[in-house]
Image: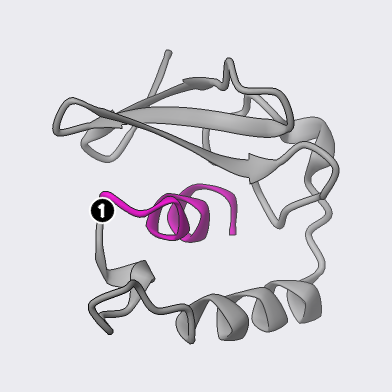
Amino acid sequence: MVRVGRYDYEKSTRVGKKLMVKVGGKTIHFGSTASGHYKDRTGIWSSKDHGDKKRRASFRARMGGVRKKGGTKAVSDPTSPAWHALRVLW
């Protein structure tokens, strides 16, 4: 288990996902094992770091447009996988 900010992250138990975190009693799995990422702040998946700033900018722009059912941005909600992926992997 690795602490980043106020959350403890660990390798996901779900097939196809990189990391998981518990937020408010809910377990959130995020990050595709098939894809790379800019920089893993936990170090667990650092082998998938690519460091490409152009890819990072594209990903962050895409994630900024993702909305939840209520219309709020997913990247603004700590119970969303998008929030964690943006802060820990990108």
The residue lying at 62 percent from left, 28 percent from top is 43
Residue 45 percent location from the top left of the image = 70, 30
Residue 51 percent location from the top left of the image = 78, 59
Q: Quadrant of residue 72?
A: bottom left
Q: Judge whether 77 appears above or below 40 on screen.
A: below
Whether residue 32 is visible here, answered yes or no, is yes
Residue at image mark 1:
78
Q: Amino acid at mark 1?
A: Pro
Residue 47 percent location from the top left of the image = 83, 32
The residue lying at 28 percent from left, 84 percent from top is 71
Q: Judge whether 4 appears above or below 89 on screen.
A: above
The residue lying at 82 percent from left, 49 percent from top is 35
The colour scheme used here is one colour
Q: Name the side, left or right, on which 58 lies relative to 4.
A: right
Q: Quadrant of the C terminus?
A: bottom right
Q: Quadrant of the N terminus?
A: top left
Whether residue 40 is visible here, answered yes or no, is no
**Residue 82 or 42: which is nearer the viewer?**
82
Residue 58 included in the magenta stretch of the image: no
**Residue 70 or 30: which is nearer the viewer?**
70
Residue 80 included in the magenta stretch of the image: yes
Task: State the extent of the magenta-drawn residues as a range.
Answer: 79-90
Q: Farthest residue to the front: give it.
A: 69
Residue 89 percent location from the top left of the image = 58, 50
Q: Residues within 10 Å of mark 1 (few under 14, many from 20)?
A: some
- What secondary structure characterizes most of the magenta part? helix
**Residue 60 or 41: which is nearer the viewer?**
60
Q: Name the side, left or right, on which 72 lies relative to 27.
A: left
